[in-house]
Image (cartoon, grey):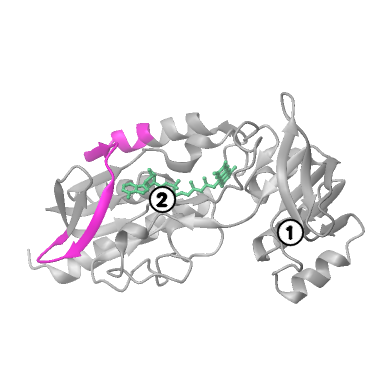
Amino acid sequence: PYEVLVVGGGPAGASAAIYAARKGIRTGIVAERFGGQVLDTLSIENFISVKHTEGPKFAASLEEHVKEYNIDVMNLQRAKRLEKKEFIEIELENGAVLKGKTVILSTGARWRNVGVPGEAEFKNKGVAYCPHCDGPLFAGKDVAVIGGGNSGVEAAIDLAGIVNHVTVLEYNAELKADSVLQDRLRSLPNATVITHARTQEITGTDKVNGISYIDLQTGAEKHIELSGVFVQIGLVPNTDWLGDVVERTKYGEIIIDQRGATNVPGVFAAGDCTNIPYKQIIISMGSGATASLSAFDHLIRSEVP
Ligand code: FAD
């Protein structure tokens, strides 16, 4: 068996694998798509000490760093089941079963798409998902936020401090965000809330130039001119394959303690697939390191050499 078997090859998994390998223990990393979400990211400007980089370049550096070590990299392999027997077993889609004395889950998450015309076409060309990452790209411009839950309203408050004007589009009759957030949003001079709004299309030519929605109260189609659209209708963790074996929140996030431990002894988790607050590269990498050091700690306490 591996001493540390990492499932997921994004920033969290790469960090976990490197920290494990540096202890000189047998380490493997299995990933559906090595690199993870950063492969879909255009520019990264908040990975501290690197002023600017691009997602694919960042992913290539992750891989290069991992390959510096004696780590078994199993790319393009999807895990479909976890079972705790003598060791922790990870069954892959292709039928193979990998064993680990400890396992670190770092399968990440994906932003829920609105699925309207223009969304996919203008991704990274005005359509964004992360206000902490991409907010400054829209300084002084007009933007919309789709979604009036906590994440949408938090995003709008955050963006209002940077952009010229922010419009929140909510499908329902009311925002769902906590009332303290709603009050805060409504107090801002450059934020507008539109409820009963069903997004129809994100418009543009080479980049976003507006958004069309149906006013569900009148049935009329309306259009707003703007430069950016932040989609904030949920972040879905890639954890369904774990079923009931590993404890998760109602949103599907793996529940971990401050050491990265899950409810299953020997199983740790890190990054966007967990319930740690704020989903960012730098945070995922930190939590990957935490989970890995905890896995090592678990090994030295549970084994007689
Ligand atoms: P992920 O990056 O999601 O990686 C998950 C890994 O697990 C992948 O390798 C995936 O293939 C694999 N996997 C999933 N399911 C399975 C399975 N069943 N079996 C095997 N492998 C599996 N953050 C910033 O800090 N700055 C930014 O500028 C920034 N911009 C972003 C822009 C976009 C468009 C997006 C989508 C995100 C952005 N983020 C940014 C967020 C950042 O990318 C994530 O916080 C970070 O990638 C999370 O790392 P992770 O390792 O936890 O998960």
* SS for dot 1: loop
On the rendered structure, is 90 left or right of 35?
left
Which residue is drawn at the image coordinates 70% and 69% (left, top)?
A: 177
Residue 48 is at least partly visible in this image: no
Residue 84 image point, x, y percent: 17, 66
Report the residue marked by disc 2.
Answer: 12
> Which residue sits furthest front?
219
* Residue occupying the far left of the picture: 305
Q: Gap between marks 2 and 1, in whole Å?
A: 33 Å
Q: Quadrant of residue 174?
A: bottom right
Q: Amino acid at mark 2?
A: Ala
Q: Quadrant of the C terminus?
A: bottom left
| Relative horizontal placement of residue 137, taking residue 263 as reference (left or right) | right
Residue wearing tag 1: 170
Q: Nearer the viewer, residue 223 or 94?
A: 223
Q: Is residue 260 magenta?
A: no
Image point (27%, 65%), residue name = 267
Picture residue at 44% right of the left edge, 34% below the top: 59
Residue 105 lies in quadrant: bottom left
- Percent position of residue 286, x then y: 45, 55
**Which sits in the foreground, 194 or 230?**
194
Q: Earlier in the sequence, mark 2 or mark 1?
A: 2
Q: Nearer the viewer, residue 197 or 156?
A: 197
Does 87 appear in magenta? yes
Q: Position of residue 156 (x, y in %)?
A: 76, 56
Q: Is residue 288 left or right of residue 78?
A: right
Label 2 CB less than 8 angstroms from ligand 1? yes
Please report the bounds of the magenta region as a residue range. Answer: 63-88
Tell me: is circle 1 under 8 Å from ligand 1.
Answer: no
Type of amino acid under label 1: Glu
133 vs 291: above or below = above
